[in-house]
Image (cartoon, helix red, strand yellow):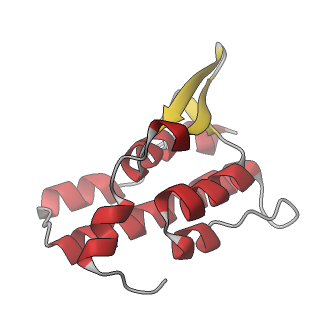
């Protein structure tokens, strides 16, 4: 992905207006799902963060449009195009999380935000997740 400017990073990291929210869900085994409204890349990142009890529920085509039109990061939207013939839903969820992680770190670098080594290790440490159980 192309580098971004400080102004672009700030713009991409903002909260979107109410009429631009992304409708998503948290799928919780075995209980069902809970609707969530995504208002920023940070909340999207948290939705896709792997954990032991849930999976993100999102239409990937809608996600791509939201990233392009509401957030404005066309590079990120293009990087997350979903091809169901080449990738499973779970694998694409992992790709979304990893790509968001990389892009958010890029934004942090551009904005001069630093993380301690402990924080970096905590965010990159592999954990057993529901993704791995399916």
Residue 19 at least partly seen? yes
Rendering quarter of residue 80: bottom right
**Which residue is at 61% across, 30% downward?**
25
As drawn, 60 above or below 51: below
Could you say where residue 8 lies in the image, as x and y percent from the top left?
A: 34, 73
Q: Is residue 101 left or right of residue 68?
A: left
Q: State the image coordinates of residue 109 (x, y, percent, origin top left).
A: 22, 75
Q: Is residue 91 left or right of residue 127?
A: right
Q: Is residue 66 above or below residue 12?
A: above
27 and 5: which is toward the camera:
5
| Camera-side residue of 57 and 77 | 77
Q: Quadrant of the C terminus?
A: top right
Among the 4 quarters of the image, the one containing residue 32:
top right
Residue 101: x percent and y percent?
A: 40, 62
| Residue displayed at 45% across by 87% down | 2
Q: Viewer-proximal residue, 114 or 60?
A: 60
Query: Is any atom of residue 49 visible in this view?
Result: no
Extreme residue in the bottom direction: 2
Q: Residue at x 53, y 27 (%)?
A: 53
Q: Residue furthest top?
A: 31
Q: How many marks?
A: 0
Out of 114 and 94, give the one closest to the viewer.
Answer: 114
Q: Measuring 66% from the left and 41% from the top, which residue is drawn there?
A: 58
């Amino acid at each position: 992905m192309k580098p971004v400017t400080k102004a672009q990073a700030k713009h991409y990291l903002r909260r979107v207006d109410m009429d631009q929210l992304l409708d998503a869900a948290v799928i919780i085994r075995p209980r069902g799902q809970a609707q969530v409204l995504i208002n920023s890349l940070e909340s999207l990142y948290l939705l896709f963060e792997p954990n032991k009890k849930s999976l993100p529920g999102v239409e990937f085509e809608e996600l791509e449009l939201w990233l392009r039109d509401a957030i404005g990061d066309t590079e990120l939207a293009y990087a997350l195009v979903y091809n169901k013939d080449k990738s499973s839903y779970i694998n694409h969820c992992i790709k979304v999380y990893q790509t968001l992680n990389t892009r958010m770190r890029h934004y942090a670098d551009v904005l001069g935000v630093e993380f301690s080594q402990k924080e970096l290790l905590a965010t990159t440490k592999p954990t057993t997740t529901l993704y791995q159980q399916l």
